[in-house]
Image: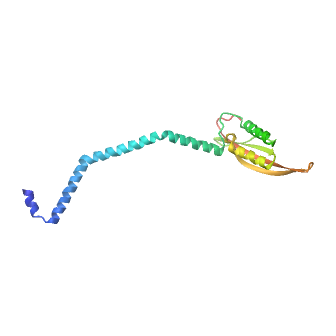
Amino acid sequence: MIYTDMLKGLTYRRKVYLLIAVFLLLLLLCHSLAFKETLKLKREVRKMKDQLEIVENAPQQIANLEIKIEEIEQVIGKNFNSGEDIQQQILEKISNYCIENKLVVKEFPKKLSSNDQQYMIETNRVVIEGSFTGLLKLLHFLEQDKKIGRVVSVDFRANQDFKTKRTFLTMFIFIQNIKTGTNDKS
């Protein structure tokens, strides 16, 4: 009854302001008593779902990283740590290809090595003679076969044999491999 007498003396505008103030006060009270804990639990649930999603995607992320590692190894040449004789593998693959495609291996000198603190870069030079298309096919074969290294340079030279007055085409190929410096025996 006291409240009704007090409300009778207020104008319509003041009643609306009073109603808004009471509503905001009740809203703050509800927030501090009930909504605050609910919102806190909702944030924790969202955080845990994100962590669960990360854990569920871990095998896929590992597979993606392994694919990226393989791509990087293909770009820089395969990393041979097992002491395999890379030069022997290169000679074997090139020789077999040359026999099948009527090319001639002219030179296969000793590999050149360059040491860094953690890595050893081995460069193998191969000199091959044959037809232009045959040499290009060999070059394509070597670039696609990433297991023996990365083809870093190619030089074609036309040479003439003055005794036979015959011109022949020679291709100089430089193939690089990267090894970690800790496991090298060569």
Image side of residue 178 versus residue 63, left or right: right
Question: Could you say which quadrant of the image residue 2 lies in?
Answer: bottom left
Viewport quadrant of the C terminus: top right
Q: Given the current orientation, which residue lies at the most extreme right position?
A: 163
- On screen, residue 25 above or below 127: below
Expressed as whole percent of the image width and height from the top left, the position of residue 174 reads 74, 46
Foreground: 168 or 65?
168
Q: Residue at x 54, y 43 (%)?
A: 64
Q: Tell whether 31 sits left or right of 155.
A: left
Q: Position of residue 165 (x, y in %)?
A: 91, 51
Asked whether the viewer can see residue 109, the reply is no
Where is 54 relative to 17, above or below?
above
Q: Nearer the viewer, residue 34 or 165?
A: 165
What residue is at 73 percent from the left and 46 percent from the top?
139
Using residue 146 as the reference point, say whether residue 91 is left or right of it.
Answer: right
Does the rendering let one see residue 118? yes
Name the image quarter holding the N terminus. Answer: bottom left
Q: Residue at x 11, y 61 (%)?
A: 7
Q: Position of residue 77 (x, y in %)?
A: 66, 43
